[in-house]
Image (cartoon, rainbow, N blue to C red):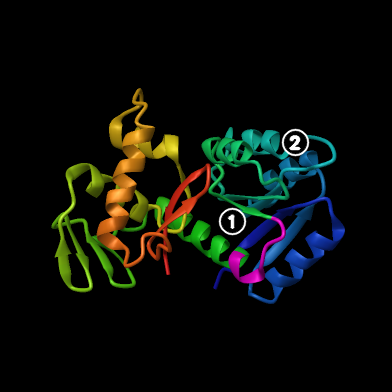
Amino acid sequence: MHKPLILIVEDEGSISNFIASMLASNGYRFVKAETGQEAAAMAASHMPDLALLDLGLPDVDGIEVLKQLRAWSDVPVIVVSARGHEREKVEALDLGADDYITKPFGTHELLARIRTALRHSQRRGGAEPLSAFVVGDLKVDYDKRLLWLAGKEVHFTPIEYKILVLLSQHAGKVLTHDFIIKEVWGPYANEHQALRVNMANIRRKLEQNPAAPRYILTEVGVGYRIAEE
């Protein structure tokens, strides 16, 4: 069985070694790069299945590395950053990063993000489209255009349904506000208020406690993701 190869782009030795040992003990292969230049060369020569990309590199900004990668490759990229700035997270996601994780992070969280990004990559690679999405008590039936919660049908407006389908087709991945708006309302829309209202309505219908959601998770200042497991 093919063991996924992961490119670790990180200039801090202790963090790089921690990630490498965690990957090795969970059945992944890895290669390491400490600079943006090295990362670009290794991505081209090793063709990894996924890249973990630190933004604070010594030679160029990680955002530049991401731009270079996206010019020729759709390899999944998880941005690993000590920066908590929403603007940079949004920029990375809009430039084609698959996800981001903020330092310090836990082993389980990083492994879950890696599994999600690899799964999405396989789906993009031509796997059969799913006919339904299921997590917990929630089921989105794409064929029948129906939603069920704990076995009961839940009525959604066409816009709410569209948002839920979009989130569920990218389950586990954070989608930026602008991405959701563009996909649901069109490329020239500016529907931030409408998105907030619709998300509040969706939560009211889905969540037992909308203040502590189980299904629709807010990434503050960035966007939303739907739980995957």
- 208 is within the stretch colored magenta: no
- 106 is within the stretch colored magenta: yes
Q: Residue at x 28, y 61 (%)?
A: 206
Across and down, in percent, residue 69 comes to 63, 38
Q: Residue at x 18, y 73 (%)?
A: 151
Judge whether residue 129 can be spotted in this image. Answer: no
Task: Choose between 140 and 72: the one closer to the eye.
Answer: 140
Side (left or right) of 90 relative to 26: left
Judge whether residue 179 can be spotted in this image. Answer: yes
Residue of label 1: 49
Crowding at mark 1 (Cα within 10 Å: few <14, some 14-19, many 20+): many
Across and down, in percent, residue 121 comes to 47, 54
Across and down, in percent, residue 189 comes to 34, 26
Quarter of the image where one finds residue 198:
top left
Residue, far bottom: 25
Mark 1 or 2: in front is 2
Magenta highlight range:
103-109
Side (left or right) of 131 relative to 69: left
Task: Report the quarter where the C terminus lies.
Answer: bottom left
Q: Residue at x 64, y 38 (%)?
A: 66
Task: Report the quarter where the N terminus lies.
Answer: bottom right
Compared to residue 222, the image places residue 208 above or below, namely: below
What numbered label is drawn on residue 61? 2
Task: Choose between 221 and 69: the one closer to the eye.
Answer: 221
Across and down, in percent, residue 35 comes to 81, 43
